[in-house]
Amino acid sequence: MIQAYFEDVRAVDTSAANGLCSAFRSPSADQWLRFQCVHGMGHGLMMVYDHDLPRALGGCDLLSEGWDRESCYGGAFMENVVNATAPHHAPHVLHSHVATHEHGAAPPFKALDPSDLQYPCSIMAQRYLVACYNMQTSVMLFFTHGDMAATARSCGDAPQALRPVCFQGMGREVSAWSHQDHHEAIRMCSFASAEYQPWCHVGVVKNFIDLTAKPADGIAYCRSVTGAANRRQCYEAVGEQIGTLRNNATEREAACGPVVADYRDACRYGARLTSTPPR
């Protein structure tokens, strides 16, 4: 258990950070389990450091590979939001050798700011912004009481380069708020402008597959989506999920097989079966 690992270590150093998930780094290892491990590490570091987000992110920075760091950042930002919006969600509080704050002390970092729906992303270093904005829609929905249209407007206020990430995060939320109903999810994604709707559908379809580990569930959603740009991005996202779930190229080809012919190349591109982007 990741939390137990950090309870036992006396220092979160490069060796401890990289040792935790080392069993999942070989090319033949299950990449989904690798993600769960390094993502969980982000949660664990937040607990170790009494939800001091910058310090937890610094722990993620110790990881040697960029993919692992990004996944760890995501866990830290998720823990920051969940702990602030649903406190005491964890089964227990860590009492680690590396924790430095006394029980009952004031939180060392302000998790959220109701006056700034871009916070904490608005104060983060550049390297953390993708992971931050991927979770920021949870903050926006919390403070707007579930107003998806207002959340879409807030994503439109994000830095331009981060808007696709924000709208993808919105899509993840849409999956939950729509209870995985295709037509309702499509309606909610329509609050995004045409330019960013494809990214909302990416978030929806990736979450569908995250929930079941079945690419067919994502393919079924993409069939319901209208508009060439939306469909292409949707099927490419399905391919990306297939690439994570299937290490074998033959299995990836088979998983993309049910995709309608016009968009099969998008799935294959997402699954890293071709380097030619879909048209």
Image (cartoon, rainbow, N blue to C red):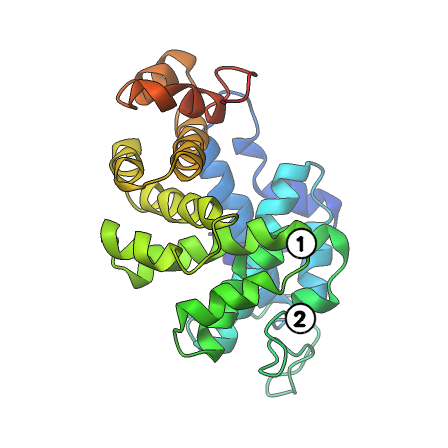
Residue at image coords 37%, 11%? 250
Percent across and percent down for residue 212 are 28, 42
Give residue 243's quadrant in the image. top left
Q: Is any part of residue 245 visible from this angle?
A: yes
* Marks 2 & 1, CB-CB < 8 Å contact: no
Q: Where is residue 247 in the image (x, y as percent from the top left)?
A: 44, 21
Name the residue type under label 2.
Answer: Asp
Q: What numbered label is drawn on residue 279? A: none
From what the image shows, is residue 106 above or below residue 163? below
Outermost residue, right side? 125
In this rendering, the label closer to the viewer, 2 or 1: 1
**Residue linked to disc 1:** 160
Mark 2 residue crowding within 10 angstroms, few (<14) / some (14–19) / many (20+) = many
Is residue 239 left or right of 100 when viewed as pictured? left
Q: Which residue is drawn at 59% across and 35% down?
A: 22
The location of residue 28, given as percent across then percent down, is 49, 20
Q: Distance between the residues labelled 2 and 1?
A: 28 Å
Q: Is residue 79 visible?
A: no
* Residue positioned 31% across, 63% down in the render: 177
Relative placement, left or right, of 244 versus 5 is left
Question: In the picture, residue 145 is in which quadrant?
Answer: bottom left
Q: Mark 2 points at which residue?
A: 52
Mark 2 lies on a secondary structure that is loop
- Using residue 216 as the reference point, say whether residue 60 is left or right of it: right
